[in-house]
C-alpha cells in the first residue's frame, strides 16, 4: 500500500511532527469550541423562547407562525455545512459585501462558518427539550404560585439536561465538520488547518502516518463527546 | 379560608363544550367532592378554579368577590392562596426538599427548612428530604405533591383524583393524610374521585358531574342511601337484576342473558348491584378459586392510567365489566384487545345500591 | 396568614441573570479578541496550485523567507482555475501558477500585474508497466497521446484526466486539441476531478495512463507500483511557473508591498538558488528560470527582461 512509515518515523523523531499535531488539535478545539459557546449563548435563549410556545394559542395565525418557525429551524438544522461554507465565503471574499472585514482565510472565518452550522442544532434540540416538558412543568409551577417568568425559568432548569446535550451534540458536529471550514479557512498550514482539513491534505499527500494520527485524535474526541452525551442521558432520564 | 361560588360556568375547547352551565358553591372549610366518569369535565373545572384556565363564560367568586381572569397579576395572587394536586404526579428534577420548598421560594420566603420538614412529616415522608424526587415510587411522589400543595398553608385545596393511580397501601396513606387535614385544619377542600368509599368517609357534600353537566348535588346520605338512577353514573360495573336468597345465606342475582352473580348479602327482588373494578381478578386461564363468581370474557378496551390499567371485558357478548390491574401485571400477562380472559370476584365484593 | 413577597421573584431572576451575564462577557471578549487578531495580522497571502504545494517546494522555501523578513506567508492551494479566481476576487496578494492561457487572461483583465517567469518543471506521461499503447521512450508527447487514444478506442488502454481546470489539465487539453481529438465521454477517458496525488493513485489502481508533473510523480513513486515514466523531455511538456501580483489599484487593501517583497525574493539570486536546491528523492524538481531570458522567451514570457528590470528597481531591496 505504500505507507510512508519510514518517512513518518524519521519526521517523528525530528519533533516537528508533534508540534504541528498540537497546533492542529488546539486550533480544532478553539474553532469548534468558540463556535459552540457563542452558538449556545445565542441558540439557547431562542430555543427556549420557541419551546415555551409563545405562539401557541387559539388564533390560527399564531399556529401558522409556529409551524413556519419550526420548519425553518428544522431546515437549518439539516443544512449541509459545505453550503454554509460557500455562502460565508461569498460574503467574506474581498469583492463581497463583508470583504472589508478582512476575515477570509482566517480562523475567525471558520468560527463564523461553524457558528452558522451550530446555532440551528442548539435551537432545535433546546426547543425540543423545553417543548416536551413545557406544558406539565409550567402548569405545575403556576399551580404552586409561580409567576409566568418564574415558571419559564423552572422549565428551562428542568430541561437542563436536554439543553446540555444540545451543546455537546453541536460541538460534536462542529469538530467533525470539514467542507465548510476548508472553503472559508483555506486550510493554511499552521494557521487554519484543523484536524479534519489536515487529514484531507495529508491523505492527499500520501502522509498516512500523519493522517492516521490526526484521525486517532479526532476519534478520541468524538468518543469523549459521545461518552458525555450518554452519561447525561442516563443520569438525567426522567421516568 | 376561601368560600367558592361557581355561577353558570361554561368552558369550550375548539368547538367542544366541556362544561355546560355549572353552578354550585362550597362553604368555608367544607369538604366538597365531585364524582363523575372520565371526560365529565372534573379536571377542567378544577383547573378553572385554580385559575390555570379561564372560563368561556360564567363566573367564579371567591370569598364574595368575582375573579378577574383577565388580570394575570390577580390570577397569580389568588393562585398563591390555593393548592392543587394533579392526578398525574409532576415533580421537579431536584431533591424532595427543593421540590417542597419551591412554592415558598417563589413567594420570596427564605427560611423554609422547618416548614418543609413539618409538612413532610404530615404526609409520612419524614427523612426523604435529600432524595431526588424522580426516584420515588408513585405513592411517595403523590405524597410529595400533596406536601407541595400544603406547605404554603393554602385557603383552598383542590385534589384531582389523588389516589386513582396509587396502589392500595399508598392510597390509604393518602386518604389518611387528607382526612387528617380535613379534621385538623380549616381548609376548604374540593376533591374529585372515582372511589365511592372516599366520598362516604370524607365528603360533607357530593356533586355528580356527567358530560359537563352537574347532575346531582347533596350529602352522601341524600344521594347514595336513597334510590335514584342517576347516581350510578359515577360507577362502573353496575347491573340490574332479580335477586333470590340461597340456602347458604347468600343471594343469587339474575342479571339477564343467563348470567348469575352471587352476592354476600340477602336481598330479594329487583336490585341494582355494582362490583368495584379493584376487586375483580383477571386471569389468562380458567381459575379454580374460592371466588364465587367466575366468567369468561374478551378484552374490548384498554385504558392506561399510569400505574393502573383499566380493561373493559365483555362477558357473554352483552355484559361489560371494568377490571383494574396494575401496569406490571398487564405487561406480564401480555394482554391485548381481543384477548380471552377469565374474571373472578368474591361474593362479598358485590355491593348493592 | 402569610404575606406575598414580590422580591422572591426578583431574586431568582437576578441570580440567573448575573451568571448568564458573566458567561456572556467572558465568551464575547474571547470572540472579540480572536476577531481582532484575525483581521489585523500582517501576512502575505499566496494562492498556488495543489500540485505546486503538494510537491513540498513552498514548505521548503517559505521558512527561509519568513526567517529573513519576519512575515508569515499563508499559502492557499487550490486548482489553477480557482487560484486565479481567488486572486481575481482580491482574496490573496499574489499567485504562483503554471497555466499560460489563464495567466494571460488574468493580466489582460487588469486584475493581475507584472507577470514574471520564476521556474519550470516538467511533465511526464506515465502509464502501466506493460505499456499497451507502446509509447515508452517517445520524445513526442503529442504522438504518445495519439497512440493512447487509438488503443483506448480498442479498449486496451485508459487515460485519467485531472478534469479540474488545473495547469496539468489545461496542458493535457491543449495536446488533445492539437490532435483535433475530443476525448470527452469516451469510455477510455476517465475524468477524475481530483488533485494530482489522487489521480496518480487512481491510475495505479486502474493501470491507466495519465499526465503528471514530475514533482508529484516523484513524491508518490513508491506507492505507484504499477506505473512507470514513459514519455519525457518534449518541449511541450515543459511547465513554466509564473508569479503575478494582484493589482493594488483594484484591491488597495491587500498587502501589495509584502507580495512585491516575496516576488522579488523568489526571483533573486538567493531565491532562485534555493529553488534549484530543492531535491526530492535525490532529484531536482524545479529549475530556475527568472534570469534565463532566452528560456523565458521560449516558454511564453516575451516581457521577461522588462519585468525583471522593473522588479529589480522596486523597493524594498531584497
Image: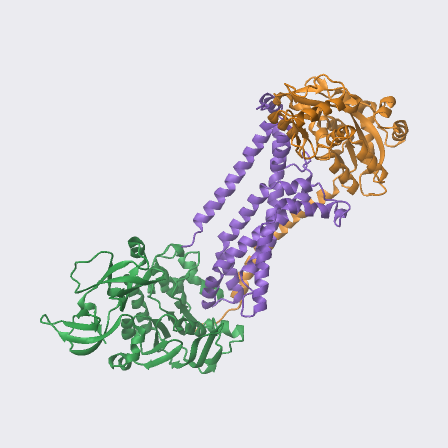
Chain painted green = B
**Pick the front one: A186 or C178:** C178
Q: How are the colours assigned in the image?
A: by chain
Relative to C147, does residue A97 appear above or below in the rendering? below
Q: Is residue B100 left or right of residue B267?
A: right
Instruction: Give the image location of residue C62, x and y in percent.
Output: 74, 28
**Pick the front one: B60 or B277:** B277
For the point 58% across and 33% down, the residue is A214
**Pick the front one: B63 or B170:** B170
For the point 77% across and 47% down, the residue is A100
Q: Is residue C68 left or right of residue B166?
A: right
Q: What is the quadrant of residue C238 in the picture? A: top right
Q: Is residue C65 left or right of residue B57?
A: right
Instruction: Give the image location of residue C252, x and y in percent.
Output: 83, 43
Instruction: Give the image location of residue A46, x and y in percent.
Output: 59, 57
Instruction: Give the image location of residue B201, x and y in percent.
Output: 27, 73
Relative to C31, does residue C76 appear above or below in the rendering? above
Q: What is the quadrant of residue A26 in the picture? A: top right
Residue B125 in view, yes or no: no
Residue B6 in view, yes or no: yes
Q: How many numbered discs, if any?
A: 0
Relative to A176, does residue B318 appear above or below in the rendering? below
Q: Is residue B322 left or right of residue A70?
A: left
Chain painted purple = A
Residue at the extreme left of the image, as rendered: B247
Q: Quadrant of the N terminus of chain B?
A: bottom left
Chain painted orange = C
Q: Quadrant of the C terminus of chain B?
A: bottom left
**Pick the front one: A98 or A232:** A98
Amino acid at each position: 500500500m505504500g505507507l510512508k512509515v519510514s518517512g513518518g518515523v524519521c519526521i517523528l523523531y525530528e519533533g516537528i511532527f508533534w508540534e504541528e499535531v498540537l497546533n492542529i488539535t488546539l486550533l480544532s478545539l478553539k474553532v469548534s469550541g468558540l463556535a459552540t459557546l457563542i452558538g449556545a449563548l445565542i441558540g439557547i435563549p431562542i430555543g427556549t423562547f420557541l419551546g415555551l410556545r409563545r405562539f401557541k394559542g387559539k388564533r390560527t395565525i399564531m399556529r401558522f407562525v409556529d409551524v413556519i418557525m419550526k420548519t425553518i429551524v428544522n431546515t437549518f438544522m439539516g443544512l449541509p455545512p459545505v453550503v454554509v461554507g460557500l455562502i460565508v465565503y461569498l460574503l467574506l471574499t474581498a469583492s463581497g459585501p463583508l470583504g472589508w472585514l478582512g476575515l477570509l482565510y482566517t480562523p475567525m472565518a471558520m468560527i463564523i462558518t461553524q457558528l452558522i452550522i451550530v446555532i440551528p442544532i442548539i435551537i432545535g434540540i433546546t426547543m425540543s427539550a423545553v417543548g416536551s416538558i413545557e406544558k406539565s412543568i409550567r402548569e405545575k409551577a403556576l399551580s404552586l404560585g409561580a409567576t409566568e417568568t418564574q415558571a419559564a425559568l423552572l422549565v428551562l432548569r428542568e430541561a437542563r439536561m436536554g439543553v446540555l446535550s444540545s451543546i455537546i451534540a453541536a460541538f460534536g458536529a462542529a469538530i467533525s465538520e470539514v467542507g465548510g471550514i476548508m472553503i472559508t479557512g483555506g486550510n493554511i498550514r499552521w494557521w487554519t488547518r484543523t484536524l479534519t482539513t489536515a487529514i484531507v491534505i495529508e491523505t492527499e499527500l500520501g502522509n498516512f502516518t500523519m493522517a492516521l494520527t490526526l484521525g486517532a485524535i479526532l476519534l478520541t474526541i468524538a468518543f469523549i463527546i459521545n461518552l458525555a452525551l450518554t452519561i447525561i442521558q442516563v443520569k438525567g432520564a426522567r421516568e | 379560608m376561601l368560600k367558592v361560588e361557581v355561577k353558570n360556568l361554561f368552558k369550550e375547547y375548539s368547538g367542544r363544550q366541556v362544561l355546560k352551565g355549572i353552578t354550585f358553591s362550597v362553604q368555608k372549610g367544607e369538604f366538597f367532592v365531585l364524582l363523575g366518569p372520565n371526560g365529565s369535565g372534573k379536571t377542567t373545572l378544577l383547573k378553572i378554579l385554580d385559575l390555570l384556565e379561564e372560563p368561556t363564560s360564567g363566573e367564579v367568586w371567591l370569598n364574595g368577590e368575582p375573579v378577574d381572569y383577565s388580570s394575570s397579576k390577580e390570577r397569580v395572587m389568588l393562585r398563591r392562596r390555593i393548592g392543587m394536586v394533579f392526578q398525574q404526579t409532576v415533580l421537579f428534577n431536584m431533591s424532595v426538599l427543593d421540590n417542597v420548598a419551591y412554592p415558598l421560594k417563589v413567594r420570596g420566603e427564605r427560611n423554609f427548612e422547618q416548614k418543609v420538614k413539618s409538612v413532610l412529616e404530615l404526609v409520612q415522608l419524614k427523612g426523604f428530604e435529600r432524595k431526588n424526587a424522580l426516584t420515588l415510587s408513585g405513592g411517595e411522589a403523590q405524597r410529595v405533591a400533596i406536601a407541595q400543595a400544603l406547605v404554603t398553608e393554602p385557603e383552598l385545596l383542590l385534589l384531582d383524583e389523588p389516589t386513582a393511580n396509587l396502589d392500595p397501601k399508598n392510597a390509604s396513606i393518602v386518604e389518611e393524610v387528607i382526612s387528617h387535614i380535613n379534621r385538623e385544619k380549616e381548609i376548604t377542600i374540593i376533591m374529585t374521585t372515582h372511589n365511592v368509599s372516599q366520598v362516604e368517609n370524607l365528603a360533607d357534600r357530593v356533586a355528580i358531574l356527567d358530560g359537563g353537566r352537574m347532575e346531582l348535588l347533596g350529602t352522601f346520605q341524600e344521594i347514595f342511601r336513597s334510590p335514584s338512577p342517576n347516581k350510578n353514573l359515577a360507577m362502573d360495573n353496575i347491573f340490574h337484576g332479580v335477586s333470590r336468597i340461597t340456602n347458604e345465606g347468600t343471594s343469587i342475582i339474575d342479571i339477564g342473558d343467563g348470567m348469575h352473580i352471587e352476592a354476600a348479602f340477602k336481598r330479594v327482588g329487583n336490585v341494582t348491584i355494582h362490583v368495584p373494578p379493584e376487586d375483580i381478578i383477571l386471569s389468562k386461564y380458567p381459575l379454580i378459586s374460592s371466588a364465587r363468581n367466575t366468567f369468561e370474557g374478551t378484552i374490548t378496551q384498554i385504558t392506561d392510567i399510569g400505574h393502573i390499567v383499566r380493561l373493559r371485558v365483555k362477558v357473554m357478548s352483552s355484559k361489560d365489566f371494568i377490571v383494574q390491574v396494575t401496569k406490571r401485571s398487564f405487561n406480564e400477562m401480555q394482554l391485548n384487545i381481543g384477548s380471552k380472559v377469565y374474571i373472578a370476584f368474591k361474593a362479598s365484593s358485590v355491593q348493592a345500591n | 396568614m402569610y404575606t406575598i413577597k414580590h422580591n422572591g421573584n426578583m431574586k431568582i431572576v437576578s441570580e440567573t441573570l448575573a451568571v448568564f451575564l458573566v458567561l456572556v462577557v467572558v465568551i464575547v471578549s474571547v470572540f472579540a479578541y480572536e476577531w481582532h487578531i484575525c483581521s489585523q495580522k500582517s501576512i502575505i497571502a499566496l494562492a498556488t496550485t495543489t500540485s505546486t504545494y503538494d510537491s513540498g517546494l513552498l514548505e521548503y522555501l517559505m521558512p527561509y523567507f519568513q526567517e529573513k523578513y519576519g512575515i508569515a506567508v499563508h499559502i492557499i492551494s487550490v486548482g489553477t482555475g480557482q487560484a486565479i479566481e481567488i486572486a481575481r476576487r482580491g482574496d490573496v496578494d499574489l499567485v504562483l501558477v503554471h497555466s499560460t492561457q489563464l495567466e494571460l487572461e488574468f493580466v489582460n483583465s487588469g486584475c493581475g500585474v507584472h507577470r514574471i517567469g520564476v521556474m519550470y518543471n516538467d511533465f511526464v506521461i506515465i502509464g502501466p508497466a506493460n505499456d499497451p499503447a507502446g509509447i515508452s521512450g517517445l520524445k513526442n508527447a503529442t504522438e504518445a497521446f495519439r497512440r493512447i487514444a487509438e488503443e483506448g478506442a480498442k479498449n486496451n488502454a485508459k487515460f485519467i484526466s485531472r478534469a479540474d481546470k488545473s495547469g496539468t489539465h489545461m496542458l493535457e487539453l491543449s495536446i488533445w486539441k492539437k490532435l483535433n481529438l475530443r476525448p470527452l465521454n469516451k469510455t477510455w477517458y476517465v475524468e477524475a476531478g481530483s488533485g494530482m496525488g489522487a489521480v496518480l493513485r487512481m491510475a495505479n489502481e486502474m493501470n491507466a495512463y495519465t499526465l503528471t508533473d514530475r514533482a508529484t510523480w516523484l513524491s508518490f513513486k513508491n506507492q505507484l507500483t504499477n506505473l512507470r515514466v514513459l514519455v519525457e523531455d518534449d518541449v511541450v511538456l515543459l511547465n513554466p511557473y509564473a508569479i503575478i501580483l494582484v493589482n493594488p489599484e483594484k484591491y488597495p487593501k491587500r498587502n501589495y508591498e509584502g507580495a512585491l517583497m516575496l516576488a522579488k525574493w523568489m526571483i533573486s539570486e538567493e531565491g532562485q538558488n534555493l529553488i534549484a536546491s530543492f531535491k526530492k528523492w535525490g532529484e531536482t524538481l524545479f529549475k530556475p528560470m527568472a534570469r534565463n531570458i532566452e528560456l523565458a522567451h521560449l516558454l511564453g514570457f516575451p516581457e521577461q527582461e522588462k519585468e525583471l528590470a522593473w522588479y529589480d528597481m522596486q523597493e524594498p531591496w531584497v
